[in-house]
Structure formats: structure tokens, C-alpha cells
Amino acid sequence: MTDRFSYDAAFARNIGWVTPAEQQQLRGKRVAIAGMGGVGGVHLLTLARLGIGAFHIADFDRFDIANFNRQVGATVSTLGLPKVDVLAGMAKDINPQLSLTCFADGVNDANLAAFFAGVDLYVDGLDFFAFQARQATFAMCARLGIPAITAAPLGMGTAVLNFMPGRMTFEEYFGWGDLPDADKALRFLVGLAPAGLHGAYLVDPSAINLQEQRGPSTVMGCQLCAGAAATEALKILLGRGKVLAAPHGVHFDAFRNKLVRTWRPGGNRHPLQRLAMMIVKRRRAAERS
């Protein structure tokens, strides 16, 4: 069936929102995505349908039934299979001409250089609690001058931050350093979404436990992340359209029908961020007592 595939025909309906020349630009771009789970998998398929021509994808995990509520590659037929292999196959079904390099051990110190080699853009698809891997990938992007996008599925919405070359870095914004994982989780949560739109309709706060590294999720949040991140990717890769870079961000919540543009100069060092973290800490302590 691959002899029937035509790149130009497959992505012809993109034309109008992009020019034919821009579509060919996208075809020549290489995007790295770490994590093939809730957001990472749908990032890959969305960008593949945009016509991106090459990917580096990484994940060490296998699909489990607990992934069914949100992960695009999780089905009965994929239970127990490596996520990176399943998503690679799905992407190749969209575009059999893809250049696809898989990193089946996830991202680590040994393969980071290869993972980012020749990459035009990084899209974060890591699990919320993958602190070490996330810190390492964003640090490498800052060193190599690679634009990086993180779109977090929060409730039934998404919070988006772009980290652009020469601008505020991930570390400068979140201030993780060598903090314990519980503190990194708190800083990540508050830093991603200063507007906190999702908190108003959380019906069971006990479902969130940062110390035990667990929290609820929705497929709507993951799908919204992919749409938002792919749009930022298009603007960055084509150099067209306004790109908000950290400390600026965007939080859209479909449940509340609200869109907020956020701005936190200094990132988590901003007084409002410090106050928000203190409030969350007290609230979580009260819920545990």
C-alpha cells in the first residue's frame, strides 16, 4: 500500500493555512519528543499529520490498562507492548516516508547528545513526575540553542510554555536546582499554570498526591495539549506568527471556557508564585491531617 502514498496528496489539505513552500519546509524539519504516553504520543501523531518529516522519539515504558483513559496508543491489542514501538508504527501509518529514530531506553545521560543531534525543535512529552529526565532535556536544549515546548494537561485544559534560544531557560523559570522531588513537583505545577484555572472543578482533591507522584488525568487535556503545542511548533519552525516565550505563557481551560495569558517575571521567584506555592503546601498539609 505504501506505493500509493504521496506526501503532497496526503498533506494537501494543510495548504491554505500554510503555503506549498512552507509545507516543504515542515517536511524537512526534525522534531524530538521524549515520552510517548498521554501527551507525547498524541504530539507525535499530530505533528506527523502536520507533515513534519523526521522525528526522534524516546520512551522506555510499555502500555498498561491504566493508560486507557488518555494515551492514544493504549488499546487492548497494544497491552504490554513498548510505547515507542507502537507509536512509531502509528506514525509510519500516517506517513510511511517518515525518518524516525527510536530511543527505547528513554532519554538519559548516555544518549542525550544523539537524541538532540540535528533536531530543530523539542516537544516535551514526559510524565509529570519525570523530574531528572525533564531537567536534563531542557538543560540540553538551552545549551544547544534548540527551541523547546512544554504543554501540560491540567484538568480539561492545557498550559503552554515556550523556552526559546537566548531567552529565559527552563531552570531560570522553575528554579528546580537540587531540590527534593516533592518541591520540584510543586514548583512545576504552580509554574506551569499561574492562573490555576483547573483547580476550581477538581471534585476529589485526594486524587492528587505530589509526594506519592500520582494525579488524575483526562483525554481532553492531552488532546488540547497536542493542538496547542503543534500550533506553537508550526510558528517556531516556519518563523511565522507571534511566539510567547517564558516567562510568558498561555492557559486555556475548556471546562471553564477561559483563556488566560500569564506573565511571571522571574518565574517561580516572583512573589505571586511564592505565595501560590505556600498556599498549595498549606492546603495539601490540611488535607492530609
Image (tube, rainbow, N blue to C red):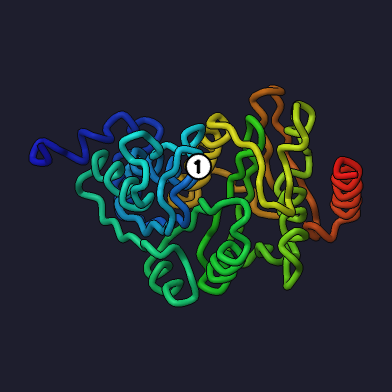
> In the displayed structure, would residue 110 be above or below residue 169?
below
Of residue 138 and residue 205, the one placed in the foreground of this image is 205
Residue at image x 29%, y 40%?
20
Q: Position of residue 190 (x, y in %)?
A: 77, 48
Quadrant of res 61: bottom left
Residue 243 lies left or right of residue 119; in this view the side is right
Q: How many marks?
A: 1
Residue type at numbered disc 1: Gly
Residue at image x 44%, y 52%?
237
Residue 170 lies left or right of residue 69; in this view the side is right
Q: Quadrant of the C terminus?
A: top right
> In the displayed structure, would residue 20 be above or below residue 272?
above
Q: Quadrant of the N terminus?
A: top left
Q: Position of residue 131 (x, y in %)?
A: 63, 62
Residue at image x 52%, y 43%?
229
Q: Position of residue 288 (x, y in %)?
A: 86, 44
Of residue 10 and residue 187, the one placed in the foreground of this image is 187
Residue at image x 55%, y 39%?
225
How many residues crowd around disc 1 within 10 Å: few (fewer than 14), some, or many (20 or more)?
many
Secondary structure type for disc 1 = loop
Residue 233 lies left or right of residue 8; in this view the side is right
> In the displayed structure, would residue 175 be above or below residue 37?
below
What residue is disc 1 on? 38
Q: Residue furthest front?
A: 289
Q: Position of residue 181 (x, y in %)?
A: 71, 62
